[in-house]
Image (spheres, rainbow, N blue to C red):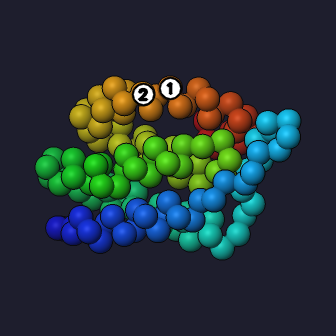
Amino acid sequence: MPFLASELELVVRFVIMTFDPPELTPRNQIVRETMGKHVIVRNMLLEMLIDLQVTINAEELLEQWHKTVSSKLIAFLLDEAVHPTSMRWIMTLLGVCLSSSPTFAFEFRSSGSYHGLPRVLPSFHDCPEIH
C-alpha cells in the first residue's frame, strides 16, 4: 500500500487547517473550540488516518508515515483548546504510534513532546474518555 508523501502532506495540512483555537479570555482561561462541521470532518479524517496506520506492516513505510502524518498532527493538535472529541482521536493516534514504533516513542520523548501532555491533559479533566 504505497502512499504518496505529497498527498499525505495535503491531508495533514487540511486537518491542521481545521483547528483555529479561540482567543484567550482576559483571565487566561482556556476556551475550547465549539463543535461544528470542521470538527466533524477533522475527526472523520483522524479516524481514517488511524485506520490506515494500523494496516501498515512495513517498518520503513511506518517511519515515513510517522514523519509525514502522525508527528505533525500530534504536535499541532495537542492543545488545550482543541475540541474534546478531537483530543480523543489525537490520544488514540498517539497510543497507536507509541505502541507501533520504538523509533516514534524515542523521537516523541526526545523532541520534548511528552512535556506537552502534563500541560494539556489536565484541561480535559471533565472528559474521562481522553484519559
Label 2 crowd (10 A; few <14 / some 14-19 / many >=20): few
List x then y, in percent, for residue 42: 54, 65
In the displayed structure, 14 sits above or below 79; it is below
Label 1 crowd (10 A; few <14 / some 14-19 / many >=20): few
Give the left or right position of residue 110, taking residue 14 as reference. left
Residue carrying label 2? 112
Give the left or right position of residue 129, taking residue 53 as reference. right
Residue under the image location 57 percent in, 65 percent down: 18
Does residue 130 show up? yes
Give the left or right position of residue 62, taking residue 12 as reference. left
List x then y, in percent, for residue 68: 30, 55
List x then y, in percent, for residue 9: 33, 64
As shown in the figure, which amino acid type bears the numbered disc 1? Answer: His
Label 1, label 2: how far apart the Cα atoms are: 6 Å
Residue carrying label 1? 115
As shown in the figure, which amino acid type bears the numbered disc 2? Answer: Gly
Rendered image quadrant of residue 96: top left
Query: Circle 2 — which element?
Result: loop
Quadrant of the frame with the N terminus: bottom left
In the displayed structure, 1 sits above or below 76; it is below
